[in-house]
Image (cartoon, rainbow, N blue to C red):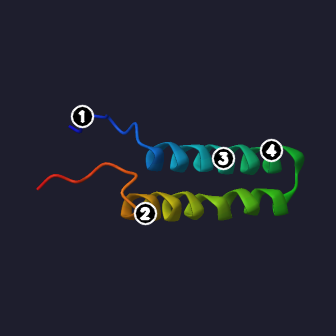
Amino acid sequence: MADNHGNTPAAWTAVVIGLVAFVVGGIGLMAGSMVMFWVGVALLPVALVALTVMNAMGLGDTPRP
């Protein structure tokens, strides 16, 4: 297991973006707004892209061999 247990800027950024995506999508479902729901769905891959890019920039955990 990593020494930092995922407490890196890359991990936190991905979690926050993912949380915002789920909140926006959930509010969209409750409000009956399918546009808002799909905006939330579209934000989920943004979290993965941000995580990948920030890991490449060295802001994430370094993988061990």
The residue where tag 2 is placed is 52
Image height of 37 relative to 5, above or below: below
Counting from the top left corner in percent of width and height, residue 14 is at 52, 50
- Residue at which label 1 appears: 3
**Which residue is rendered at x = 75% and y = 48% of the image?**
24
Viewer-side residue, 40 vs 56: 56
Q: Kindly indicate whether the residue at mark 1 contacts the one at mark 4 (C-beta within 8 angstroms).
A: no
Counting from the top left corner in percent of width and height, residue 23 is at: 71, 43
Secondary structure under the numbered disc 1 in the rendered image: loop
Occupied quadrant, residue 1: top left
- Examine the rendered structure and indicate whether residue 32 appears above or below residue 48: above
Count how many numbered circles sit on residues in the image: 4
User: Tag 1 or tag 4, which sits nearer the N-term?
Assistant: 1
Q: Is residue 11 positioned above or below 3 on the image?
A: below
Q: Are marks 3 and 1 in contact (CB under 8 Å)?
A: no
> For the residue carrying disc 4, how many other residues have a C-alpha within 10 Å: few (<14), some (14-19), or many (20+)?
some
Q: How far apart are marks 4 and 3 (CA)?
A: 8 Å
The circle on residue 27 is: 4
Answer whether labels 4 and 2 touch (C-beta < 8 Å): no
| Label 4 vs 2, first from the N-terminus | 4
Quadrant of the image for the C terminus? bottom left
38 in relation to 12, above or below: below
Q: Mark 3 points at which residue?
A: 22
